[in-house]
Every structure is written in structure tokens, then in C-alpha cells.
Image (cartoon, rainbow, N blue to C red):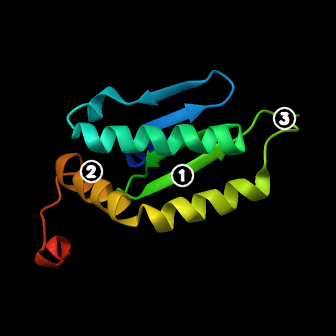
Amino acid sequence: MAMCKEKEMIQEEIVLCGSSAYTQKYYLNEEFNGLPEGIKEELKIMCVLYTEDIGGTLALVFDEEGNLQFQAAADEGDLLYDDIGSVLKIKQLQRDKQDLLESLELYFKVFYLGETLREEDLEV
């Protein structure tokens, strides 16, 4: 019985989008097709440029609390993948795209987690 409770408490992460240098493909979760075209395009550019510059794969994933996480990975033995560049590039994206990322988190929390907006959430 305890095992069932554990499974109920664990909520899977939800992928927003991702890109792969290996397959040269971009993915946007169809659940987010309702996002404005400009935002979808900005996400695509951000992910594809990351994998073109750094290599490997990049996924933007919402955790169970609605926080947007960057998940970078590379195939084992990929000598072209830039580990240090990956960390620096993600920090740069988090800084340069802070407004976009915060807006996406708010969107997810309201429309997917059912949280209500607070006045401080609406401050610019």
C-alpha cells in the first residue's frame, strides 16, 4: 500500500520543448500549441541555437511546482559536446530570457496547475 501512495505523490515533469543536435530536430509539446506564435518561435530559436552552438540536446521542462528547468545532455563519448559552454550558455539564456521564462512559469502554474493569480504576479 505504501508503494501506491509513493506513486501518487510523484508527478512527472512536463516537457515544454526541446532540440537535438543529433537528429537536428526541434520538438514543442502539442499541449502548448495555444501559446502565441511569437513565443513559440522564440523558444524554437533559443533551443536550436543552443544545440547548434553547444551540441547534445536541450529540453525545457516544468517540474512539479511549475518551475521551468533547462535539461542539457550529451551522448556518451560525444567529444564535440561543450560541458563548460553548456553551463555558461544556460546561465546566459536564463538571464537574457528572464521575462519570457517567468511568463511561461506563470502560464503553466495558472493553466496547468490551477493556481490563482496574485497581485504581485501581475507586477511588471
Q: Which quarter of the figure is the N terminus placed in? A: top left
Task: Tell me which amino acid carries mark 1.
Answer: Phe
Q: Nearer the viewer, residue 79 or 29?
A: 79
**Image vertical order of residue 113 relative to residue 117, above or below:** above
Q: Residue at x 71, y 39 (%)?
A: 55
Residue 90 makes an appearance in the image: yes
Q: Residue at x 25, y 31 (%)?
A: 33
| Disc nearest the viewer among 3 and 2 | 3
Residue 4 makes an appearance in the image: no
Percent x, y of residue 38: 27, 42
Give the residue pinned by disc 1: 70
| Distance from the alpha carbon under mark 3 to that under mark 2 | 34 Å
Disc number placed over residue 112 in the picture, else none: none
Local crowd at mark 3 within 10 Å, few (<14), some, or many (≥20)? Answer: few
Q: Residue at x 88, y 38 (%)?
A: 79
**Left or right: 101 as drawn, with respect to 23:** left
Q: Which quarter of the figure is the C terminus placed in? A: bottom left
For the residues bearing labels 1 and 3, Cβ distance under 8 angstroms: no
**Left or right: 124 as drawn, with respect to 64:** left
Sequence-wise, the earlier of marks 3 and 2 is: 3
Sequence-wise, the earlier of marks 1 and 2 is: 1
Percent x, y of residue 7: 44, 41
Sequence-wise, the earlier of marks 1 and 3 is: 1
| Distance from the alpha carbon under mark 1 to that under mark 2 | 15 Å
Percent x, y of residue 95: 49, 68
Give the residue pinned by disc 3: 78
Give the residue pinned by disc 2: 108
